[in-house]
């Protein structure tokens, strides 16, 4: 009885701290919290050490590590900077600029992790918007929401999808063909909602509050000319390492070819990553410096926490009652996933709800709903996903502020509409 009580306390305290992102009076991030909670569960006997080590899914960890190495190589090559510079040339044409941001953030996030693309695009979108005398808020909202929506389309788009891909065994092509269409529609929804929520920014010949604030003026033609001049400047500032860019492009193409050919996703990502590390021009340390080891530790700790959680009497009761009812309906499972994702974040939510997806009458559809809903749910609030916070922080470094309420105005309708489209699509195509 004492072990059960201690286990429940540790699990609840750990998940609450992970959801909050900190522990009062302690300088612990989510990775440290997850690791400490996992260690505590082992100490109190909630899970034996051998089982705890076995709970860590090395396939998911390896896939994450491989993708991070590839993305680090692409960043070092300057290819992402080149894309960002090209975007800046459209800043004089608001709706087209918005469409380009949505397309770039969505497509690139599906291929190279949403957090990475937000890290690259956030500062550029903010600075470009301000220098082109535009209100940066709508474009920053579009960057974050499109990155989340687009990342849902593939197994490699975000960490929770990688986890689902490794656990479910769903082939890459099947995953894309099922979630790709609602993700594509979701990108269109992002564009429409942002235009409707921020109508003054997309009217012709009008200065936005942000432009008034920085005391800038100019005609539409002048704005377009300045945007083109700024684009030329950014392009000139981009340092492209052509040999590394070519090698990165070949490695990425090989990885995608492996996915399409049905090669296990871990192998398809690991081999190109290993090839990138075997280089005569760039030190391995530079590539490994782009690896988010905090995220890997966070995942490892969460694997242990969720395995220990599944062994408790409280979770067994919850699974028999509330959660089993939610899993019986695609719409209820989608709603439950959305709710849990916004309470404890999407990765812990996926880990907690994974047993329900695995035990569903149609496991493949349940896994896909879990992937779609946990990702789209991240657009609800500014705090809903790490990608959103990365955009806000990146914008702040360029003097632009993305506030909670400004984001919420677009985040709520985008989340509700994309979830409805995604759930309906996956229900009809099951």
Image (spheres, rainbow, N blue to C red):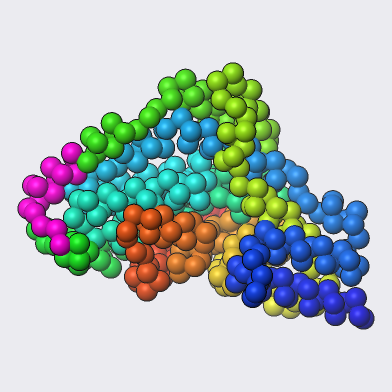
Quarter of the image where the C terminus is located = bottom right
Name the foreground residue: 41 vs 162.
Answer: 41
Note whether 118 is above or below 313 in the view shown: above
- Main SS of the magenta segment? helix
Residue visible at 79% across and 59% down in the picture:
304
The mark tally for this picture is: 0
Q: Position of residue 311 (x, y in %)?
A: 84, 68
Residue visible at 20% across and 51% down in the picture:
132
State whether residue 171 appears in this view.
Answer: no
Left or right placement of residue 38 versus residue 351 in this view: right
Where is residue 64, by image quadrant?
top right
Q: Position of residue 88 (x, y in %)?
A: 27, 43
Left or right placement of residue 182 versus residue 98 in this view: right
State whether residue 137 appears in this view.
Answer: yes
Left or right placement of residue 124 versus residue 263 in this view: left
Note whether 74 is above or below 64 in the view shown: above
Quarter of the image where the N terminus is located = bottom right
Q: Position of residue 353 (x, y in %)?
A: 68, 64
Residue visible at 60% across and 42% down in the picture:
291
Note whether 254 is above or below 408 in the view shown: above
Q: Position of residue 391 (x, y in %)?
A: 42, 56
Q: Is residue 35 magenta?
A: no
Residue visible at 58% across and 31% down in the picture:
255
Q: Which residues are magenta?
A: 215-229
Name the foreground residue: 363 vs 192.
Answer: 192
């Amino acid at each position: 009885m004492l072990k059960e009580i201690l286990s429940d306390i540790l699990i609840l305290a750990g998940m609450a701290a992970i959801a909050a992102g900190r522990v009062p009076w302690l300088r612990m991030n989510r990775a440290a919290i997850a690791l400490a909670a996992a260690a505590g569960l082992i100490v109190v006997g909630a899970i034996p050490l051998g089982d705890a080590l076995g709970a860590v899914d090395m396939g998911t960890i390896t896939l994450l590590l491989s993708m991070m190495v590839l993305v680090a190589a692409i960043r070092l090559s300057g290819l992402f900077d080149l894309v960002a510079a090209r975007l800046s040339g459209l800043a004089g044409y608001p709706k087209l600029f918005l469409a380009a941001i949505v397309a770039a953030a969505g497509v690139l996030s599906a291929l190279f992790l949403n957090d990475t693309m937000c890290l690259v695009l956030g500062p550029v979108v903010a600075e470009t918007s301000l220098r082109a005398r535009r209100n940066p808020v709508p474009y920053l909202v579009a960057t974050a929401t499109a990155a989340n929506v687009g990342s849902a389309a593939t197994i490699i788009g975000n960490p929770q999808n990688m986890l689902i891909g490794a656990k479910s065994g769903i082939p890459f092509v099947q995953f894309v063909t099922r979630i790709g269409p609602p993700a594509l529609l979701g990108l269109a929804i992002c564009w429409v909602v942002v235009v409707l929520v921020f109508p003054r920014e997309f009217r012709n010949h009008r200065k936005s509050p942000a432009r008034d604030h920085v005391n800038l003026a100019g005609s539409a033609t002048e704005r377009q000319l300045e945007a083109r001049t700024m684009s030329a400047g950014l392009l000139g500032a981009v340092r492209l390492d052509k040999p590394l860019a070519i090698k990165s492009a070949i490695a990425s193409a090989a990885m995608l070819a492996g996915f399409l050919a049905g090669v296990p996703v871990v192998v398809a990502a690991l081999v190109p990553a290993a090839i990138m590390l075997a280089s005569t021009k760039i030190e391995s340390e530079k590539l490994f410096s782009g690896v988010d080891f905090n995220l890997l530790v966070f995942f490892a700790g969460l694997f242990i926490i969720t395995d220990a959680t599944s062994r408790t009497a409280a979770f067994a009761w919850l699974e028999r009652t509330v959660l089993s009812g939610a899993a019986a309906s695609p719409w209820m499972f989608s709603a439950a996933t959305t709710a849990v994702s916004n309470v404890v974040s999407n990765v812990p939510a996926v880990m907690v709800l994974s047993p329900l997806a695995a035990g569903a009458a149609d496991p493949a559809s349940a896994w896909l709903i879990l992937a779609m809903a946990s990702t789209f749910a991240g657009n609800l609030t500014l705090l809903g996903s790490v990608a959103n916070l990365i955009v806000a922080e990146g914008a702040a470094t360029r003097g632009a502020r993305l506030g909670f309420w400004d984001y919420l105005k677009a985040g709520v309708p985008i989340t509700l509409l994309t979830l409805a489209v995604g759930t309906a699509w996956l229900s009809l195509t099951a």
